[in-house]
Image (cartoon, coloured by chain):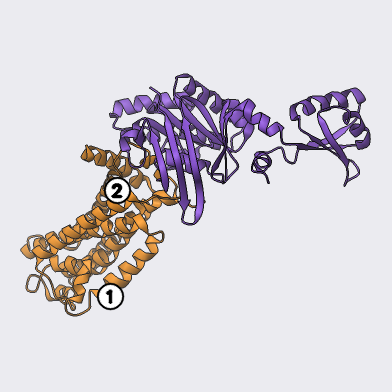
Chain colours: A purple, B orange
Amino acid sequence: MSLVLKAEKIGKWYGNVLGLSDVTIEIGPGITGLLGPNGAGKSTLLKLLTGQLRPSIGRLTVDGRPVWNNTALFRRIGFCPEQDAFYDEVTGDEFLTGLLRLHGYAEAEARRRAGRALEIVELAGGGDRLIRGYSRGMRQRIKIAQAIAHEPEVLILDEPLSGLDPLSKRKIIRLIKDYRSEGRTVVVSSHVLPEIEALTRSIVLIHQGKILAQGDIPYIRELIDAHPHVVAVRSADPRRLGSLLVADRAVQSVSYGPEENLVTFETRQRDRFFDLLPRVVAESGLDLEEITSPDDNLQAVFDYLVGK
Amino acid sequence: MAEGSIFRVFVFALRLVRRAKKMRVFAVLSLLPVLLAVILRLNAVASPGRGLDGLAVFGNIIVAFGLQFLVLILALFYGTSVVSEEIEGKTLTYLTIRPLPKKAVILGKYAASALVLLVLVLGSTLASFFILNLGRLDYGPAWSFLGKSLAALALGVLGYTAFFTFIGTFLKKSVLFGFFFSFGWENIVQYFPGSTQKLTLMHYLKSILPGVGETSPSVLQFLMFRLDPSPAPLAVAVLLGLTAVFLALACRVFSRKEYLFEE
C-alpha cells in the first residue's frame, strides 16, 4: 500500500543558483518532517518529489519509478503546495470536484469524494462559497482537501501550517496525524521546529540545499542541546537573578548588560534551564519583565550544525 | 485515453474561462459591432432618404474590427493565458499534479478558450450581419459573404489562439510580445507587396474573404488593398496546418519545461 520515496545523490540548480546538492534520502510510511530555514531547499525537494521539477543530476523515484512526467504516479500522490493560490472564482466544492474529475472520476463519484474531503477538513459548510471569500485557515484547509480527496498513498505537504492561527494549526495537525494512521506515507515541511515536533518524531534537517541530519526527534534534540542557547532576561534585579541561577549545572555562563535590567544566560541544557527559571523566580519573588532567547530558532541551530 | 484527459481539462477550463473577470470586458468588446449595427440601422430608419449599404458596412466591420482587432486581441489575451495565467496565479501546480498527460492540459485549455472566443466572435458577427442586412436577406452574394467571413474569423480565432498559446508556454512577457506581433508584424507586413505578406496569418485570412466581382465595390476596395491573395483552399490548409504546428510546439515545450513561480 505505502510507497517509498527515494532520492539518490540528486542535485538541482536554477541556472547558477544551487537548490539542492547531493541529496540522498529514503522516505517510507509514517510522517517525515522536513525541517529547515526559509530557502533551505525544502520546497525544491518537495517539488522534485511531486514532479514539478526535474533533478539536474541523480535519480529520484517513487515506488522505484522516476517521477518526472510519470503521470500515472500522480494518482497515488497528493500534494499541498506552499503558495496561497487558487482559482478564486469557483466555490470550494467546484474546485475539488473539478480537480477530481481530472483524476478521471465520474461526476457523481467526484462529488462524493469532494464532499468527504470537505468534511475531513471541516469545511463542509463552506463548500458552496467562492474561494475568494475564504479566510486564510479555510484556504489552507481546502488546499489540503484537494491533496487528500483522491486518497493518495503518499501525501506531501509544503508548509501546511504556515500563517495559521493556533486553533487552525491544531485541526490540521490532527488531520495529518489521522492520515498517517491509515498507514500512508506523509512528508511535511516546515521551518518551525515545534510544528514538526507536534507531528512526528522522524525528521530530516535540510540547510543550504543539503541534508544536515536525519533521525528521530531525540537525536535532533541532542544536536540542538549540544549548542549553547542564549537566554536574555529583563528583571528589576538582574544581578540577584544571576546569582540564584549560576550555581545550577544548566547554566554555563552569566553576563550583565548592556542595559541595566538585562541578564544573559548561556545554557547547554535548555529544557532544564526553562524548568529552573520559573521555579527560582517564584521562590525568590523576583519580578520578570521579559524572557527572550535570541538564538532559540532553527537558523541558530543550523548555523551551529554547519559550524558557523 | 488522451482524448478523455483533454475533454476533462476542457470541461474544467471552460468553467474557469466563463467565470473569469476578463470575460465580461471582452464580451462587451465583442458586442461593439452589434451596437454599431443597431445605431446604423436606427439611423437608416430615422432618415429614409439615406440608404444603408449593410453589406459594405458589414465587410468593413469584418476586416477593420473583426479580423484586425477583435480576433487578435481576444486570441492574444486568451491564448497567452492558457499557461502564463496559471504561472502568474501560481495555480499551475493543481493541474500538473494530476494524472494527465501534459499535452492534455494545453489542448484542453486551448479548446475551452477557443470555444468561448468562437461564440463571442461568431455570435457578434452573425448578429451584426442580420441587423445590417435586414430587408436584403434574399441577396445571394450576401450569404456567401457571410459564410466566408465566418470561416475567416473562425480560422483566425483558432490560428492566433494556438500561436499565442505556444508563445505563452515559454515567454514571460508573452502579452507584450503578442501586442508587437499583432499590431506590429501582422498589421503592417500584410500590406507589404509580393510574397512578403504571406509571412502573416492575416494574409491567409483575407485570402478566404470574397474576391473581386463577388460583392459591392466599396467592400472590395477596402479588402483588396495591396492584397495579393493566395487561393482560398490553400489559405485554409495553411491556416489549419499552422494551428496544428503551433499546438504541437506548445505541447512539446510545456511537456519539457519546468515552470517556476515568482516569489
Quadrant of image for the N terminus of chain A:
top left
Residue A25, image x, y percentages: 48, 35
Residue B27, image x, y percentages: 32, 54
Residue A234, image x, y percentages: 85, 38
Which of the numbered marks, if any, corresponds to residue B188?
A: 1
Q: Answer yes or no: is residue B150 visible.
A: no
Q: Is residue A204 left or right of residue A194?
A: left
Check the residue under mark 2 and report the chain it is in.
B
Q: Which image quadrant is residue B39 in?
A: bottom left
Q: Earlier in the sequence, mark 2 or mark 1?
A: 2
Front residue of A171 and A276? A276
Dot 2 falls on a residue whose secondary structure is helix
User: Mark 2 = which residue?
Assistant: B106
Q: Which image quadrant is residue A149 in?
A: top left
Name the residue furthest bottom: B193
Relative vertical location of residue B193 with respect to residue A293 in this rendering, above or below: below
Determine if marks 2 and 1 fall on one subunit: yes
The residue at 6%/62% (across/down) is B140
Identified by mark 1, the residue type is: Ile
The residue at 72%/40% (across/down) is A295
Residue B69, image x, y percentages: 29, 65
Identified by mark 2, the residue type is: Ile
